[in-house]
Image (cartoon, helix red, strand yellow):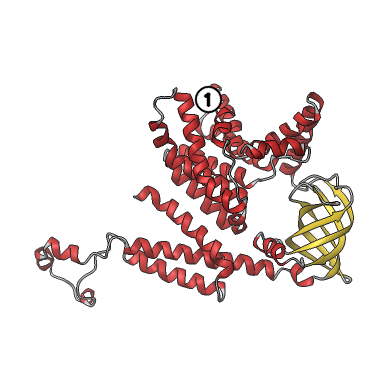
């Protein structure tokens, strides 16, 4: 059972984050309640035997008297086996509610949220590539400087930028100066979606100026690699195939052919159009194989592997599924370095819990939910399913089991969000 404590903890914390928008009261109240539940659960945990008389600890006990206690009497003093687990799980749910509430309150109290509506000039870096929309484009901007009404502020906040006309040629990581109208969206659903994602407000841009590449050297390096690889792919392949490869390799879906994208999604292969968690393994495996071939030491292999994963996450724009896989890879590498490997379930749970603590908005990301659901389902069910498919050749059985397990994990989410699941998904993914 101990191997599932961390998965239960991650699930409980995520449940609390999802419940946070509907929770009444102030976030700190929920955190205090979480602390009380955690203290009670810790006190009831196994190994903390309690005397029948709550005041017995005030007087020293004779060793002989203790020796005469029957084992049954000691066992009767133990709390119920599941009581402490329930209390600790409840403390994690309450912690999620409080932590999610703090994240929400911080976004609602952000300067940009309070300034709206206003005419502003913003400086910051693009978190996402500009994406073409109806008669315009949109992107997410991490703001560092705000000017409005003759005043200026330094902030660390995020806005949704939208504009009419041709999409900006800037790419994620670039620094921009944006002038426009700051407002809270009139659409209540969209406004709530932005709030959950930690986005303070929306800017309808009238002027957009690219100031240059990122200030961060590792982001600039990723931008240079991305540009070089993109140019090479476009030179070698026709536009349709180049757009597909750019999405798969770099997470750049700006060149995807719409008709091709519809065909892929209709057969349940939409995940092949963009970079995903599986790409982390495809990049890391040959790097570690090369490190072994060069007979590098443990620390060198660890540093090389961790650096490769971190750079790939930056290169692909820190997509939720890639971050999940990247943190899992980092935890697995750390466990190997320390000689303390952990089960796949514990590594997944540790990655999920850590990411949700750092960025509670991830709990609302459909991409993150699908990635975690598919991975958890494969960990739990792929091996049992493969055993039942022993009549098939081993490679086919493993591929079919992994695909079927992943599909079981994501089907509830697909039905909830997209209201459909293609019938040919399993066969198409096995063949792919």
Q: Which of the 4 image quarters holds residue 279?
A: top right
User: Looking at the image, can residue 16 be seen?
Assistant: yes
Which residue is situated farthest in the front direction here? 423
Q: Residue 61 in the image: state x and y as whole percent.
A: 16, 71
**Res. 303 visible in picture:** no
In percent of the image, x 58 and y 44: which residue is there? Answer: 421
Q: Nearer the viewer, residue 351 or 156?
A: 351
Q: Nearer the viewer, residue 257 or 340?
A: 257
- Identify which residue, 162 or 283, lies in the foreground: 162
**205 to the left or right of 139:** right
Does residue 68 appear left or right of residue 268 in this picture? left
The residue that disc 1 covers is 292
Number of numbered discs: 1
Residue 83, percent across and down?
Answer: 32, 64
Please state the horizontal and vertical placement of residue 135, each as a whole percent of the image. Answer: 86, 52
User: Would you say 427 lies left or right of 196 here?
Assistant: left
| Residue found 31% across the figure and 61% down from its top | 82
| Residue for point 60% across, 51% down | 419
Assess disc 1: are there few (<14), some (14-19) or many (≥20) residues with their C-alpha within 10 Å of its C-alpha.
few
Q: Position of residue 58 (x, y in %)?
A: 23, 77
Q: Which quadrant, please, contains the C terminus? A: top right
């Amino acid at each position: 059972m101990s191997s599932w404590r961390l998965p239960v903890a991650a699930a409980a914390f995520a449940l609390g984050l999802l419940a946070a928008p509907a929770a009444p009261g102030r976030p700190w109240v929920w955190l205090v309640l979480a602390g009380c539940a955690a203290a009670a659960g810790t006190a009831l945990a196994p190994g903390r035997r309690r005397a029948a008389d709550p005041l017995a600890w005030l007087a020293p006990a004779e060793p002989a008297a203790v020796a005469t206690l029957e084992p049954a009497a000691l066992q009767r003093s133990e709390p119920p086996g599941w009581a402490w687990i329930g209390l600790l799980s409840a403390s994690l749910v309450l912690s999620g509610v409080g932590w999610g509430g703090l994240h929400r309150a911080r976004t609602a109290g952000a300067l940009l949220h309070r300034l709206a509506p206003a005419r502003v000039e913003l400086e910051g870096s693009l978190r996402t590539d500009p994406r073409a929309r109806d008669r315009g484009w949109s992107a997410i901007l991490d703001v560092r400087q705000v000017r409005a009404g003759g005043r200026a502020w330094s902030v660390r906040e995020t806005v949704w930028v939208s504009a009419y006309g041709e999409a900006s040629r800037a790419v994620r990581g670039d620094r921009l100066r944006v002038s426009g109208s700051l407002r809270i969206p009139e659409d209540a659903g969209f406004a709530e979606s932005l709030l959950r994602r930690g986005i303070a407000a929306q800017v309808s841009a009238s002027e957009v100026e690219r100031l240059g590449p990122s200030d961060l050297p590792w982001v600039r390096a990723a931008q240079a690699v991305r540009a070089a690889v993109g140019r090479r792919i476009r030179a070698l392949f026709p536009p349709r195939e180049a757009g597909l490869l750019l999405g798969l390799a770099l997470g750049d879906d700006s060149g995807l052919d719409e008709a091709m994208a519809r065909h892929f999604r209709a057969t349940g292969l939409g995940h092949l159009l963009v970079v995903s968690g599986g790409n982390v393994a495809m990049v890391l495996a040959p790097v570690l194989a090369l490190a072994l071939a060069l007979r590098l030491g443990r620390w060198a292999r660890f540093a090389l592997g961790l650096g490769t994963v971190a750079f790939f996450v930056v290169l692909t724009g820190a997509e939720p599924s890639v971050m999940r896989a990247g943190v899992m890879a980092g935890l697995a590498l750390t466990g190997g370095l320390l000689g303390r490997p952990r089960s796949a379930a514990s590594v997944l749970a540790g990655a999920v819990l850590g990411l949700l603590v750092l960025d509670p908005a991830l709990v609302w990301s459909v991409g993150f939910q699908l990635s975690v659901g598919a991975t958890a389902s494969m960990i739990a069910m792929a091996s049992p399913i493969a055993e039942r498919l022993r009549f098939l050749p081993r490679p086919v059985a493993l591929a079919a089991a992994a695909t079927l397990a992943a599909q079981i994990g994501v089907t509830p989410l697909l039905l909830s969000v997209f209201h459909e699941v293609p019938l040919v998904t399993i066969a198409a993914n096995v063949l792919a």
